[in-house]
Amino acid sequence: MLILVTGCAGFIGFHTAKTLLERGDSVVGFDSVNDYYDTALKETRLKILAETATRTGNTFLFIRDNLANLKAVEQCFADHRFDRVIHLAAQAGVRYSLVNPHAYVESNIVATTNILEACRHAETPHLTYASTSSVYGANTRMPFSEHNGVDHPLQFYAATKRANELMAHSYSHLYKLPTTGLRFFTVYGPWGRPDMALFLFTKNILAGEPIQVFNHGNHTRDFTYVSDIVEGVIRASDQIAAPNLAWNSDTPDPATSNAPYRIFNIGNNNPVKLSEYIDAIEKALNKKAIKELLPLQAGDVPDTFADVSELEKQIAYKPSTPVQEGVARFVRWYREYYQV
């Protein structure tokens, strides 16, 4: 297939594009390569994608532009007829949304509108897009289920991603565009973002510097290894969303619709305390952390826990990489990449 992967220079987008190339698909990648974090890391990912295409004999074409640029998106869809669109580009990060909300409007709202419009006019067979576990916000019923309401976000990042889900539904309803939204749960692994906890903790521990441990390490996260996320993304993309014939407008199910629309959680279904996560990093590094214990940060939720029963039922997949194994893989990559 010919597949558009937006955010292909980013963490999850890179791994997704690479896996698609390795299985025999051709990929058009779209990314602005902004400086939210080290662009050298992004450029290296792009180089690896080009090398992967050469090695596998498949095609990788890269478009360096901003998805908020409507003309660039329209030109992309005019030049290519996509079998699938996997929209992973976004302004990520919970805490950054507290200081620069406008970046989230451009990257998450305007850009996604442009993708939806382009898919609509091109009659794209299936749009799969990234959402986040952050949409569960003030919910405390565990594990988080797609069938529960998610209308109490705790920060603007989550609000924009929830908006993406609602925007997708309107296009699925109005234009019969099949859409699948995927709520990712705390993704980690090699080639990760430098602003994420695993990256920061590893860097500081190796340097003998303190790590900031929020909520005194007591909150839990459903840490999900990146290759497990990618497997879920690709399987969901392959299976085109269809209307739920049993959907009842008197008792509407938030996860499905009478339109070709659906939402899935992708998480490890095994929450781990932050303190235990740090233990795994210390073990992989064979070095103890200097911990600066701090209260829970504004906008953070105390716990996340993914109900993945729908993912299992609908696409026969469940993430399974243990945290200790995933963290060890990241540390090996980090040492090699930064020659530490």
Image (cartoon, rainbow, N blue to C red):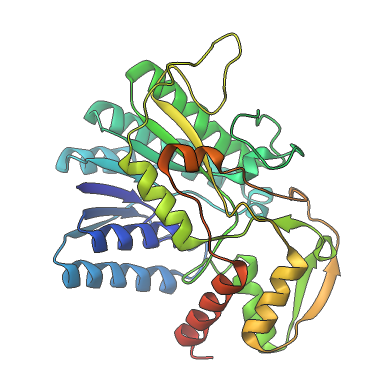
The part of the image, by quadrant, that contains residue 133 is top right
Quick check: 238 left or right of 247? left
Q: Report the front residue among 155 and 98.
A: 155
Q: Report the front residue among 207 and 100.
A: 207
Q: Residue 339, how many percent across, how many down? A: 49, 90
Q: Residue 301, how many percent across, how many down? A: 75, 48
Pick out the residue farthest to the top. Answer: 250
Q: Can residue 88 be seen in this view?
A: no
Q: Report the front residue among 123 and 141.
A: 141
| Picture layout, residue 11 above or below residue 151 | below
Which residue corresponds to the image point at 32% horizontal and 58% vertical from the top-left?
Answer: 17
| Picture layout, residue 49 above or below residue 76 | below
Quick check: 158 left or right of 76? right
| Picture layout, residue 182 above or below residue 302 | above
Which residue corresponds to the image point at 69% horizontal and 69% vertical from the top-left?
Answer: 277
Q: Residue 235, how many percent across, how many down? A: 36, 47
Q: Can residue 289 be seen in this view?
A: yes
Which residue corresponds to the image point at 42% horizontal and 74% vertical from the top-left?
Answer: 40
Q: How many marks?
A: 0
